[in-house]
Amino acid sequence: MRAIWTEENKFAIWLQIEILACEARKIPAKDLAIIRKKAKFSVERINEIEKVTNHDVIAFLSCVAENVGPASRHIHEGLTSSDVGDTALAFQMVQAADILIADVKALRKVVAKKAKKYKFTPCMGRTHGVHAEPTTFGLKMALMYDEFGRALARLERAREIMAVGKISGAVGTHTHLSPAVEAYVCRKLGLKPAKISTQILQRDRHAEYSAALALVGSSIDRWAQEFRHLQRTEVLEAEEFFAEGQKGSSAMPHKRNPITCERLCGLARVLRGNCLAAMENVALWHERDISHSSVERVILPDSTTLLDYMLVKLTDIVDRLLVYPARMQANIDLSRGLTFSQAVLLGLTKKGLTREAAYKIVQTNAMKAWKDSRMFKDLLLEDAAVMEHLKPADVEKLFDVSIHFREVNNTFKKVGIRG
């Protein structure tokens, strides 16, 4: 990813665009041959010239001309700086998107493997951070797989929205270049020509691309935070891999901290901040001003590189995640069967009680279980109001955890995890 954003790669794309434009304009064959043979650049020389010109594209063209000689008069004919810069930037953003798309595919593969392994491993589902009803750790991972399926679609859409170039001149009117030149250059680069442009491609495209990166980063944030919660001492159902020789604290030798997940949560904030900057770039003066350029030189390399790093790290976290099914079961047992309260409520309503009456009976026993540290099921079996409508065997059946897992296979099929 870093290689995409080097000066070397940027100038190489600029040179490719300039040569393609010469080809499209059908300049004399002899001059085109010279350009193809001699056109080259030196980043060091470009930087040296730019100290005088204070203009990067002119410095680049001057450097190339020094190597090409008289035939260089054909280079950049009819083009403006943004024809080269914006088309090259779009090409780089597509290159970056291809890496990110591959990253998400690799992540989903690892997540699917974990989902299948723990498909029917019971764990406590929590709402508001409080025990709700049982789920499975496999379903958690299936949810993650599905979310990153949407992340994949967003990145593919972002790639598509940026796979556009423009070679249309100073204000986009093709005054000095035929649209055929634009079409030729873009086709050779694997881009589509913009239907209409000004001196630049419109920045809503770049903002949408940045929003996609930020959204994927927010999904990373969401799952890194989930794993951080699961690693809390009071929960400890899963934790980051802790290598031999690794240290968790300079003061407390016992510490095993979710530092990588915390790092990912922090970096997601950077992506969201960069997205805001990209949105600020949409409103430019008339056919173009240059206020967006300095911003993009920071946020686009940073955001794509950051997201690449974050996806690779999250993949490693999931792949080496330490999962503790016994602790999951122990945590389920902590609530003394209270998580079956809805099953009991529905069992009573099916026997003819109004929902209000059934709710009162169930809640009364649930609160007593909390207060007296009693098993919820035992209290129900002792309650005459319950036994008037349910047999002990009925109550026992309502506490069967398997009722929560009836649709697991169907859910896996729906999200596309096979096996």
Image (spheres, helix red, strand yellow):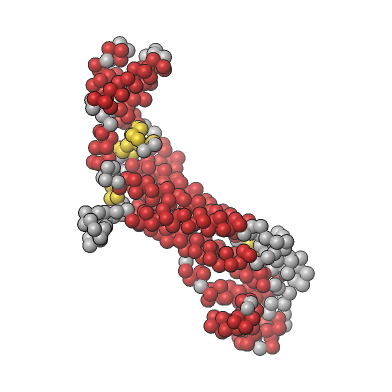
- The residue shown at (39%, 36%) is 128
Residue 48's spot in the image, x, y percent?
57, 84
Res. 2 in view? yes
- Above or below for 70 versus 114: below
Q: Which quadrant would residue 361 be assigned to in this image?
A: top left
Q: Which quadrant is the C terminus positioned in?
A: top left
Q: Residue furthest top?
A: 388
In this rendered view, identify the residue nearer to me: 59 or 398: 59
Q: In this rendering, would 291 be left or right of 248?
A: right
Instruction: Compare residues 28 and 223 and report the one nearer the observer.
Output: 223
Whether residue 397 appears in this view of the structure is: no
Q: Is residue 160 above or below residue 415?
A: below
Query: Which residue appears at 25% of the width and 41% of the height?
Result: 327
Residue farthest toward the right in the current orientation of the protein: 175
Residue 16 pos. (x, y %):
61, 75
Q: In the depicted view, which residue is nearer to us: 166 or 291?
A: 291
Left or right of 275 in this view: 176: right
The residue lying at 53 percent from left, 75 percent from top is 7
| Apparent side of residue 85 relative to residue 126 in the rendered image (left or right) | right
Where is residue 132? Give x, y as percent: 35, 32
**Quadrant of res 135:** top left
Rendered position, 315 above or below 345: below
- Picture coordinates of residue 207 (x, y %)? 59, 56
Picture residue at 51% right of the left edge, 69% below the top: 4
Above or below 270: residue 185: below
